[in-house]
Amino acid sequence: MNAQAARVYARKVAPERSVKPSLTVVSSQSPRVAGRFMLTSVVAAGILLVMSVLGITSFTSHLAMESQPLNTELNILREQNQALQEKLEERSSSEWLAKRAAEQGLVPYADYGYVNLKTGEISGGSAAR
Protein backbone atom coordinates (compact mmCIF):
# COMPACT_ATOMS: atom_id res chain seq x y z
CA MET A 1 0.00 0.00 0.00
CA ASN A 2 1.28 3.30 -0.82
CA ALA A 3 0.89 6.44 1.24
CA GLN A 4 -2.01 7.79 -0.69
CA ALA A 5 -3.98 4.60 -0.44
CA ALA A 6 -3.23 4.46 3.28
CA ARG A 7 -4.71 7.88 3.77
CA VAL A 8 -7.85 7.00 1.87
CA TYR A 9 -8.15 3.77 3.83
CA ALA A 10 -7.61 5.61 7.11
CA ARG A 11 -10.36 8.02 6.28
CA LYS A 12 -12.80 5.22 5.53
CA VAL A 13 -11.88 3.12 8.53
CA ALA A 14 -11.50 5.92 11.07
CA PRO A 15 -14.73 6.92 12.72
CA GLU A 16 -15.97 10.26 11.70
CA ARG A 17 -15.89 12.85 14.32
CA SER A 18 -19.35 14.24 15.04
CA VAL A 19 -19.58 17.93 15.31
CA LYS A 20 -21.34 18.86 18.54
CA PRO A 21 -23.39 21.99 18.39
CA SER A 22 -22.37 24.64 20.87
CA LEU A 23 -25.13 25.65 23.28
CA THR A 24 -25.58 29.28 24.19
CA VAL A 25 -28.17 31.13 26.27
CA VAL A 26 -30.30 33.44 24.18
CA SER A 27 -31.50 36.44 26.10
CA SER A 28 -34.89 37.81 25.24
CA GLN A 29 -35.08 41.22 23.66
CA SER A 30 -38.04 42.48 25.75
CA PRO A 31 -37.89 42.64 29.57
CA ARG A 32 -40.27 40.68 31.75
CA VAL A 33 -43.43 42.77 31.97
CA ALA A 34 -45.28 40.67 34.53
CA GLY A 35 -42.70 41.14 37.29
CA ARG A 36 -42.33 44.84 36.70
CA PHE A 37 -46.12 45.32 36.57
CA MET A 38 -46.57 43.42 39.84
CA LEU A 39 -43.92 45.49 41.59
CA THR A 40 -45.44 48.72 40.28
CA SER A 41 -48.90 47.63 41.45
CA VAL A 42 -47.68 46.78 44.95
CA VAL A 43 -45.81 50.08 45.29
CA ALA A 44 -48.82 52.05 43.99
CA ALA A 45 -51.17 50.24 46.40
CA GLY A 46 -48.81 50.97 49.31
CA ILE A 47 -48.59 54.65 48.41
CA LEU A 48 -52.38 54.83 48.04
CA LEU A 49 -52.86 53.20 51.44
CA VAL A 50 -50.46 55.61 53.16
CA MET A 51 -52.08 58.60 51.45
CA SER A 52 -55.55 57.41 52.51
CA VAL A 53 -54.48 57.07 56.14
CA LEU A 54 -52.86 60.52 56.07
CA GLY A 55 -55.96 62.02 54.46
CA ILE A 56 -58.30 60.51 57.04
CA THR A 57 -56.03 61.62 59.89
CA SER A 58 -55.80 65.13 58.49
CA PHE A 59 -59.57 65.38 58.02
CA THR A 60 -60.22 64.10 61.56
CA SER A 61 -57.85 66.64 63.09
CA HIS A 62 -59.45 69.39 60.98
CA LEU A 63 -62.89 68.45 62.31
CA ALA A 64 -61.57 68.39 65.87
CA MET A 65 -60.10 71.87 65.53
CA GLU A 66 -63.29 73.12 63.89
CA SER A 67 -65.49 71.70 66.67
CA GLN A 68 -63.46 73.14 69.56
CA PRO A 69 -65.17 76.58 69.53
CA LEU A 70 -68.54 74.85 69.27
CA ASN A 71 -67.75 72.71 72.30
CA THR A 72 -66.73 75.82 74.25
CA GLU A 73 -69.99 77.54 73.30
CA LEU A 74 -71.93 74.41 74.28
CA ASN A 75 -70.33 74.39 77.72
CA ILE A 76 -71.15 78.09 78.22
CA LEU A 77 -74.77 77.49 77.18
CA ARG A 78 -75.02 74.53 79.56
CA GLU A 79 -73.78 76.71 82.44
CA GLN A 80 -76.29 79.45 81.52
CA ASN A 81 -79.07 76.86 81.30
CA GLN A 82 -78.13 75.52 84.74
CA ALA A 83 -78.19 79.05 86.20
CA LEU A 84 -81.61 79.77 84.65
CA GLN A 85 -82.94 76.42 85.88
CA GLU A 86 -81.85 77.27 89.43
CA LYS A 87 -83.44 80.72 89.17
CA LEU A 88 -86.69 79.15 87.91
CA GLU A 89 -86.75 76.68 90.79
CA GLU A 90 -86.13 79.53 93.25
CA ARG A 91 -88.95 81.61 91.83
CA SER A 92 -91.29 78.63 91.74
CA SER A 93 -90.96 78.07 95.48
CA SER A 94 -93.92 78.95 97.70
CA GLU A 95 -91.82 81.24 99.93
CA TRP A 96 -90.74 83.44 97.03
CA LEU A 97 -94.28 83.57 95.62
CA ALA A 98 -95.68 84.54 99.05
CA LYS A 99 -93.07 87.27 99.42
CA ARG A 100 -93.80 88.71 95.96
CA ALA A 101 -97.57 88.58 96.58
CA ALA A 102 -97.16 90.48 99.87
CA GLU A 103 -95.01 93.09 98.09
CA GLN A 104 -97.83 93.64 95.58
CA GLY A 105 -100.51 93.87 98.29
CA LEU A 106 -102.15 90.51 97.71
CA VAL A 107 -103.57 88.56 100.65
CA PRO A 108 -103.64 84.80 101.05
CA TYR A 109 -106.91 82.87 101.00
CA ALA A 110 -108.43 82.47 104.41
CA ASP A 111 -111.08 79.98 103.44
CA TYR A 112 -112.35 78.74 100.13
CA GLY A 113 -115.80 79.73 99.07
CA TYR A 114 -118.08 78.51 96.30
CA VAL A 115 -120.44 80.30 93.94
CA ASN A 116 -123.68 78.59 92.90
CA LEU A 117 -124.18 79.67 89.30
CA LYS A 118 -127.93 78.89 89.19
CA THR A 119 -128.83 80.94 92.20
CA GLY A 120 -125.83 83.26 92.34
CA GLU A 121 -125.29 82.52 96.05
CA ILE A 122 -121.86 82.42 97.67
CA SER A 123 -121.50 79.64 100.17
CA GLY A 124 -118.64 79.05 102.59
CA GLY A 125 -115.43 81.00 102.79
CA SER A 126 -114.89 84.51 103.99
CA ALA A 127 -114.29 87.79 102.23
CA ALA A 128 -110.75 89.01 101.77
CA ARG A 129 -109.70 91.95 103.92
Image: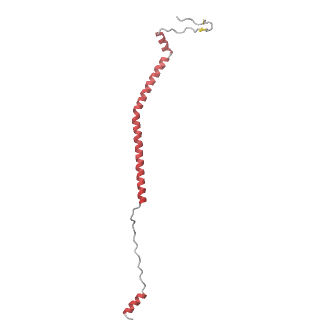
Q: Is residue 95 above or below residue 36?
A: above
Q: Nearer the viewer, residue 74 or 48?
A: 48
Q: Is residue 50 above or below residue 106?
A: below
Q: Position of residue 92 (x, y in %)?
A: 49, 17
The residue at 41%/29% (across/down) is 73
Specify the farthest residue to the front.
118
Specify the farthest residue to the left.
3
The colour style of the image is secondary structure
For the N terminus, which image quadrant?
A: bottom left
Q: Is residue 97 above or below residue 65?
A: above
The residue at 41%/40% (across/down) is 59
Specify the farthest residue to the bottom.
1
Specify the farthest residue to the right.
118
Q: Position of residue 33 (x, y in %)?
A: 41, 60
Find residue 9 and report its image quarter. Answer: bottom left
The residue at 41%/31% (across/down) is 70
The residue at 40%/46% (across/down) is 51
Q: Nearer the viewer, residue 112 or 93?
A: 112
Find residue 63 and report its image quarter. Answer: top left
Q: Position of residue 129 (x, y in %)?
A: 52, 4
Q: Position of residue 39 (x, y in %)?
A: 41, 56
Q: Is residue 104 above or below residue 29?
A: above
Count of numbered circles on the image = 0
